[in-house]
Image (spheres, rainbow, N blue to C red):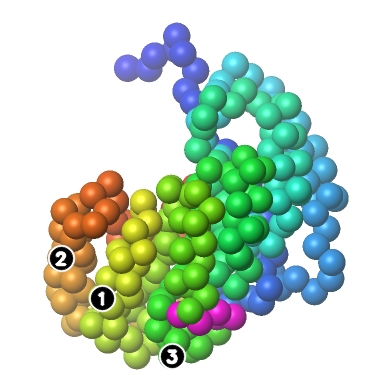
Amino acid sequence: MFNFTAPPPLALYVHIPWCVRKCPYCDFNSHELRDELPERDYIAALLRDLEQDLPQVWGRTVESIFIGGGTPSLFSPEAIAELLSGLRARLNLKPGLEITLEGHPGTVEQQRFADFRAAGINRLSIGIQSFNDTHLERLGRIHGRREAIRAAEAAHASGFDNFNLDLMFGLPQQRIDEALEDLSTALDLEPAHRSWYQAHPGAQHLVSFPSAAAAGWMTACRTSRKRARSGSAPEAILSTRSRLTPGAGANAGTT
Ligand SMILES: C[S@@+](CC[C@H](N)C(=O)[O-])C[C@H]1O[C@@H](n2cnc3c(N)ncnc32)[C@H](O)[C@@H]1O
Ligand code: SF4
């Protein structure tokens, strides 16, 4: 039965499509940055676009915002502040709502995280994929294990209690113990949330997930879940979604 007395709340996804380099496995709507980042023009275009949809959301409250990509942490903290103030001026935002920014370990340092926080971001989602240098290199990532760990430490040090780490499993030639080692390292870094994505078999560069190994992966997943619930980070939720619908911005608000 529908309840028409209160309009349903909203979650807003904002897409920022640029990255330092396009990872060969990634089928998001993301593009290598070749020129200067058009921060102001892009924000102005986003807000014009939003204005066209405002009649559809009249009287409704936005309960969370997810700024994803791409690599939104490429935008300056000033640009993110400008975007958020444009959203505040046009939308009815719930006080204290969760506002997530997606970041990449190759583009962050502690002061930048602190500045994003001052700009109004209260949750980070950091794309780690693996802590194993060999796998990171095979994936074409621009960062290594050290930068990945440093990014999580910088998130804590700059006051983000609420952050997510993205990991991928089923990588080319990855063994189960290596994937578990990644999970264990992630748990040790005490993020509030982890996303553990099965490498999407349709993506260029990645091999299919071997079904014969599925039972082993599921056991690994259950063990990690137990640790997430009873171990060092009791608040944690472990996501083990198989994911990615090919196409633009398919990750709206998922991590
Ligand atoms: C839009 S990316 C944003 C994160 C950031 N740009 C980075 O890569 O560090 C969101 C997440 O999607 C996941 N992802 C990307 N391509 C994938 C694929 N082919 N299969 C599974 N997960 C994938 C990765 O975990 C990635 O961190
Ligand atoms: S995985 Fe992240 S950094 Fe790599 S191309 Fe996709 S969005 Fe960009």
Amino acid beneath label 1 = Leu
Q: Which residue is mark 3?
A: 134
Q: Which residue is mark 2?
A: 223
Q: Residue at x 80, y 37 (%)?
A: 48
Q: Which residue is the extreme one toward the top?
A: 5
Q: Residue at x 27, y 54 (%)?
A: 233
* Main secondary structure along the magenta-highlighted residues: loop
Range of the magenta residues?
141-145
The answer to which quarter of the image holds residue 12 is top right
Q: Where's residue 132, x and y in %? A: 40, 83
Amino acid beneath label 2 = Thr
Residue 67 in view in this figure: no
Amino acid beneath label 3 = Thr
Label 3 and label 1: CA atoms lie apart by 15 Å
- Count of all numbered marks drawn on residues in the image: 3
Q: Where's residue 113, x and y in %? A: 60, 56
Q: Are marks 2 and 1 in contact (CB under 8 Å)?
A: yes
Question: Is residue 163 magenta-colored?
Answer: no
What element does badge 2 sit on?
helix
Q: Where's residue 45, x and y in %? A: 80, 45
Q: Residues within 10 Å of mark 3 (few under 14, many from 20)?
A: few
Of the 4 image quadrants, the one containing the N terminus is top left
Q: Are marks 2 and 3 in contact (CB under 8 Å)?
A: no
Q: Where's residue 249, x and y in %? A: 58, 56
Q: Which mark is residue 180?
A: 1
- Observer-nearest residue: 172 or 67? 67
Q: Residues within 10 Å of mark 2 (few under 14, many from 20)?
A: few
Q: Are marks 3 and 1 in contact (CB under 8 Å)?
A: no
Label 2 and label 1: CA atoms lie apart by 10 Å
